[in-house]
Amino acid sequence: MDSALFPEGVKRCSPKVFLLWTLPWLCLLAWGGLSAFLCLYKGLNQTNMNDYFAFAVWIVFDLAVIALGAGAFFTGFLTYIIGKKELKDILNAAVIIGFICYSGAIAMLGIDIGQPIRGWFIFWHVNVHSMLAEVSFCITCYLGVLAIEYLPLILENRQLDKVKELRLFGHNLHGIMAVFAATGTFLSFFHQGSLGGMYGVMYARPFAFREGFYIWPWTFFLFILSAIAAGPAFTILCTKLAEKITRKKLVPEKAFQTLAKISGWLLALYMVLKITDTVNWIYGVVPRAGLAFMDFYREGPYGVWLVVAEIGIFGIIPAIILLVPKARQHEGWLITGCLLNCTGIVINRFVFTVVSLAVPVMPFDKFVSYLPTWQEWGIAFAVIGYGFLLFSLSYRYLPVFPRERELNPLSE
Amino acid sequence: MENPATSPKKSSKGGWISFLKGLLPTENGSAFVPPFSLIGWIFLLAGFFGAFTFGWVVYPVALYSRQPQPISFNHALHLDPDVGGIEGDTETEKCLYCHEFRDDGTFSGIPKLAKCTECHDDPESPLGETQQEKEFMEKYVAGQKEIPWLIYYRQPDCVYFSHIAHVKMGKIECQTCHGDHSKTEKLPIYRANLLTGYSINIWGKNIAGYKTNTWDRMKMDDCAECHTKKGHEENNACFVCHK
Amino acid sequence: MELNRRNFIKFLVGGAAGIQLTPLPWKLTDDIAIWTQNWPWVPVPPVGEFIHEKSICTLCPGGCGIEVRKVDDRAVKIEGRTDYPVNPGGICPVGMGGLQLQYNESIRFTRPMKRVGPRGSGVFIDISWDEALTMLAGRISGLREKAMPEALAAVDGNPARSTLSLMIERLVKAVGSPNYVRIPCAEDTYEMANFLMQGTLGPMAYDLENADYVLSFGSGLLEGWGAPGRVINAWGLWHENPAKKRVKIVQVESRASSTASKADRWIAAKPGTEAALALGLCHVIIKDGLYDSEFVNECSFGFDDFSSAGGKDRAGFKTMVLKKYSPAKVAEITGVASDDIVSLARDFAGAKAPVAICGKGKGSLSGSLYEFMAVNSLNAITGRINKPGGILVHEPIPLSSLPEIDFDDIASQGLEKPRFDAAGSTKYPFSNSLINNLAAAINRSPESPVDTLLVFAANPVHTLPDGGAFRKALKKIPFIVSFSPFRDETAYMADLILPDHTYLEKTDDIVWPAGLQYPLFGLSLPVLEPVYNTRNAADVILKLAKQIGNSVESAFPWKRFEEVLKERAKGLYSSGAGLVDYDGTNPVWKRLKEGTGPGPDYASFEEMWKKIVSGGLWYRLEHTYKNWDNLFETPSGKFEFFSSKIELAVNAYAEQAGIDWALRDMGLAGKGDDVFMPHYEETASDADRSTFPLMMLPFEIINLTSTWVPNPPFLNKALFDTQLRGDESFVEINPETAAKYNVGQGDRIIIKSPEGEVRVRANLFEGAMPGVLFMPLGFGHSAYDEFSKGKGVNPNDIIHAGKDPLSGYPVWWNTPVKIIKV
Amino acid sequence: MEKGHGHGNSYGMVIDLDKCTGCGTCMVACAAENNLAVRPDESDKQRSITWMRLYKVTNGKEFPHTEVCYFPRPCMQCDHHTPCVSVCPATATKMDYHTGIVSQIYTRCIGCRYCIAACPYHARTFNWWDAYFPKGKGLERYLSPEVSPRMRGVVEKCTFCHHRLMRAKNNAYAEERRELEEGEYITACTEACPAQAITFGDLKNPEHKVSELVKSRYAFRLLEKLGTEPKVYYLSTKDWVRRMADNYLPGEFKPIAKVKLG
């Protein structure tokens, strides 16, 4: 029925099955839609955020998806700037994932601020000293770049491709993609860093505060590194997932291996720096504030186990897995490694967002706990639903994986 | 995937040029159909200019309300030395005769009825015969009802403005911000932005926000501009004008 | 050129492009943002001219000076007055939030109303003032025609001595009923103690500012005791210079209240044993010979043993105290270490200007007679009576009394009848009103003896510590009239509502602010036009009297309340003393020490009155100190440690059925001569301690009203989330006790007393005495609006009220309870 | 000691904790003065809007040695590297170096709450709801025109009653003066405190009482170690109270030898 829209020479499931598949994601979107409406119409009292947890699950999600979305710019960077041609086969997927992550994040931010209609004040009345301003600028611009990177792929849809001027346009966009890849890389480096900077500069919050280089606290660089370490891993995961679901080989193994290797090295490097930073913090910032390392973990559910988990289980271990060729060539291990890797980054973002705010600074202040409302979950999960939906549609109607056809020849 | 346009090899060279070429209609290449036929251009331009005129002509009118003042008032007449009893050596003093400062330094703004009745207390008081003047005496003076004046220069609630700081300490003439009302014989129509409720005098009569006189507009930037010009940057601190 | 899809798209594209080049999208974006900055549902306070009006706050008997800041005719802020001697600038949080009582339609009555729904439902319909007055006048006249005027009763919560309360009492009397009942407060007990030991009738007057050692027996100096604006200011003065702090504050209390925990020394005596402690201190002082022999020997009676008429040998105060109140014994009773008792006694006696004060909490609840007498004795033996920094004994303020009423027959016959509350009878010889007895009387009899009840400035349903007895009684009373401006619990029970103005809309007087050490007459003036169709209760009484006619009408020869006030003020003028100007530069308490002051600062009465009406006060500086030989008006003419008045009264009552019966019936456990002297009586309780092993003690906090005045919502911000969380209030309990019942912080528990049970949450607080549960007063309203309705529980509901020996006042500090974990 | 940057004044506050009785009048005065929104339930302290907030601390000793102390906490108006100012993306909050007061512009604020996260004193609160003024109740009649009521979705905080500074200036101008006398401009809480525990003035002006008091050996500030240089000082003779004001490593806190009384 909609087969006229399929890329040439590939097999896609029947509309019925496809609809069935999208159903759960549509439900998530509906849930998110309702939540969003409530939050915008009635205000943020619909959430469980409060003056102690000014940032909460949404910001954690934002930071997480943005970090995981880093696969897009970094793969682009490797492909066009470094010239790792084999990655072309996975680049489209990376771009789509990136687009999903960033558009999702920006949508969430739009609901998270108390006055969305005035949101543009960030740009109009910008305070250049604010890391958040830097973040907003970069992610908005970068979303634009992603759109441009996404566009030619859309134009390659079999029907659109028939329109000559569109085809020409898309074709030429392809030609200059390197330029955008470069721009994207530049922007991303900055906002990934600024996201870390956001916490590093909160110098009245000893848990988050870090010294740094010039105006950039160490978290600035750590966040960049962790993002480019986790981004490719996430791209691998998504593609692998797509392969599992479609029961097809979509990307040549070489691409995976290259990404995994790079991701592994970066993660390893990140771990080294992260550990140095933590130690440096324990003996610098913390005692200067009159605190001891353990003071931060005395109350509430957030114990030292978080540190162990973040650095140990979800840091060092995946690094090793991804670095050992034998391990990463084994698909099971590869996926495990990537999973641990991504989880580690999510934990890191969670710790910096929630734990920083949960730990009281005033000695007589008390620890308060926080649990999100269904509205908060709704919006968070909507992003996931939206992701699955967009990726599925792209896969169905666009030649996302250039090598799909030759890897899965149609048996006449 | 026969389509050459999408195959990487070709696009890798001379991307820019062919990109731009593709956008322009060119004669050579017989197979080539120009992307925009003449009719296409007509529709395009029709849409363009339609929107253009709407934005520049219709919108500015539609955006604002038009409300007349409850009754008319003649500044010129009141300030006429032969008629009105309003004294004052300088223009400012004359204004302050009715728009006065209170003892605590606050500004009374548009006078209350009490101010009017200082002169127009009884039917014998100097007053013309027009319907409006009759209404003034009967409806408001007799009925002791305040006149619901519409205020042209009322700033929004978030703004704090000290007249005494500007007029008495800053020695700024009233008309610098309000224009010269001493000669006006009738009050202009009050126009308020239907979305924001702001008087048109605040955002400025010109839809593009373009101003010729100091009193054309009363936005934050105008205050800041003057502070800076007069070397009072310290008064550009947020809380000086915001409450 | 047909308009096909492609062309239409082109048209749109062109339009989209074109619009970008006009101001529309940009101005629109800006305007929508501006719209969010001026949302129509966010109120914009109207601007106008700022006006400041001076008055006096009458939300409590403290009477602090207030200045109301207005914008045109709208009040926007209440601030303290610096040109008023009681409170130099500061006021309490309640007074500060006063405007929320003024401008809140859902807690105020906006016009006279009559009940249509069932009792307590709070369903009323509007009626006119004439209709309302006719209805009430008719009812009262009806009672008079039926020759049962005594069936009219009034409950009055206005401060004692205030002109309004005089008018209310006068109305009830003029109608012919003896049943004028007041809401009991600490000052009543205090005056009784004074009357018995000194024979004086002057009000409570502590010269706190000039004292250098303040020993407070549970007085919540920081909880709103006396005039908060004054007392807390004094607190500030005491701590003025940390380097050389002169004044020492000692708090006797079973809970670490703000006062206790901020005091220099906290003595945690078991609730109800304060008398023993005071006598224990006397013991040490006497034993060590630290007492003021001049006063004791020259000016007191019954200190040493003596032989009464008939040569009977009597044991005096000294003997009794030395025999029965040794530190060891007192330690046993009070739980205070005996060394502490000794050192405390020596510190007290050793101080230059010590003073012992009493009246628990805010002083808005009655006290124990013997306890107050004991504290009085402590002041007496150290010679602190009528000395700077001590207790000052004054004549009542010289306001002229209202003309004698000439009663018609019905009235005089009615007044013959006994009071329903038996106050002033041989059984309760010294009390002039006992509201708890009134409730009991009504609940006892099948038909309520009270037919019509008038309620003024009181909310007994919520504020009486009686386990709900009064609420029960109200149900039986056929006709209830509320004069409350507020929709309180008692008003909900009423059949007729005659709403009073709020304190900012009415003229009223403050006669001697609570606890002040010098006479002061203040005038609270209407600073606002009444916003609703309400009337000053006093003016309503005048109108009512006219309509009732006869001797009632003739008893009220005035047109307006202001005339009454002016007439009373004449007495101030004829006293030939006093000042009406105060500029705040030189505090009155400083000038008071000299005891002499400048003569009157006015020439004529009219001048004086004009100044009072503008400045709002009259006060007097002259005071004769240490005039012990002609000060006391007791039978012996001396300060009586051994009260002949009590002896006479008890003996008189004993004539009915013997002394033992008399003592028992008067609720006295003490035997022999003890009962005529301050002594410690273990608070009697009929409850079975094995089922109710714990004690519950209500306490007052300054940022929550526990009187008839509603709580301004602003104050909810100042409550801690360990006092109220959501709709649940907390009980303070010692961690040790909590552990016994394995109750944790925030756990929900049920507190059960013989009177009933309440559900609260536990707040573990080291400052709470083990074995005692402390519940704040002021929560648990079933009336008012969402800001206070249904928030927390009211400890009064489960209070197991006993009777104070001799005085008959309710005992609220001895409720046996048990806790059940939910 | 030189406070603040540039010239002009540097307004500050000294709160004597020995005098403070925890009565909460400052909180109420502040709320009434600044049109603070009041909701039916104010018991959720993580969402209740307070500019001046009371913290209750105890020395933790068991009965009957328990001591209680109250910390009234306005905005600290941090003088150095004001944590909230640098983070605001839309320039809605700034430090005015001529008064030392940190401003907060509600109409500029977009409600991202980054400033709330950055402030360790919890001096900033967010408007989670629309201001509560039900129809027909008439609560809005007590609102003061000197402070603009806030809309939902923005952050607000103590402003040292900046409008009172403007009021004082207007008064001065009416008398042809530019300079303000000490006490002409004080905050609502300072004025209201019945114990006179709060002193307010210009820290830069040696004439003003505050600049004297901050030199006291009993003077201290909240979380001084963070280097935010608050302009709100506290006084207490009690060591355990002073220790409450900051985090200390073992042995780091230096008690003051008790002074003899009288």
Image: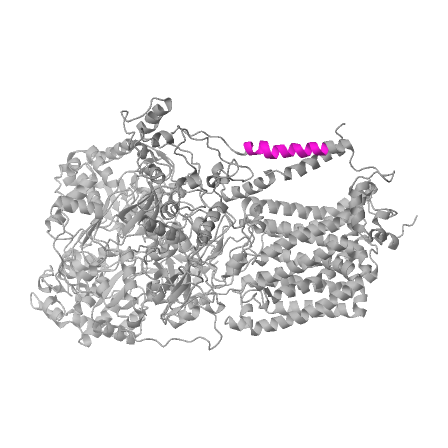
Q: Quadrant of the N terminus of chain C?
A: top right
Magenta-tinted stretch: B43-62
Q: Does the magenta run of residues contain B44?
A: yes
**Does residue A312 appear to the left or right of C497 in the view shown?**
right
Q: Nearer the viewer, residue D136 or C556?
A: D136
When asked about the image quadrant of residue C728, the answer is: bottom left
**Does residue C202 appear to the left or right of D220 in the view shown?**
left
Give the image location of residue A323, x and y in percent.
76, 69
Residue C783 appears in the figure: no
Judged from this view, the residue extending furthest toward the right is A412
When asked about the image quadrant of residue C505, the answer is: top left
Give the image location of residue A32, x and y in percent.
64, 48
Per the picture, the main secondary structure of the magenta-coloured stretch is helix
Give the image location of residue C85, x and y in percent.
23, 55
What residue is shown at x 51% (from left), y 70% (from top)?
Answer: A289
Residue C399 appears in the figure: yes
What residue is shown at x 70% (from left), y 48% (from top)?
Answer: A25
Q: Nearer the viewer, residue C755 or C186?
A: C186
Color style of the picture:
one colour
Number of marks present in the image shown? 0
Q: Nearer the viewer, residue A153 or B173?
A: B173
What residue is shown at x 50% (from left), y 42% (from top)?
Answer: C39
**Does residue C612 appear to the left or right of C338 in the view shown?**
left
Q: Does the magenta run of residues contain C563?
A: no
Give the image location of residue C142, x and y in percent.
23, 33
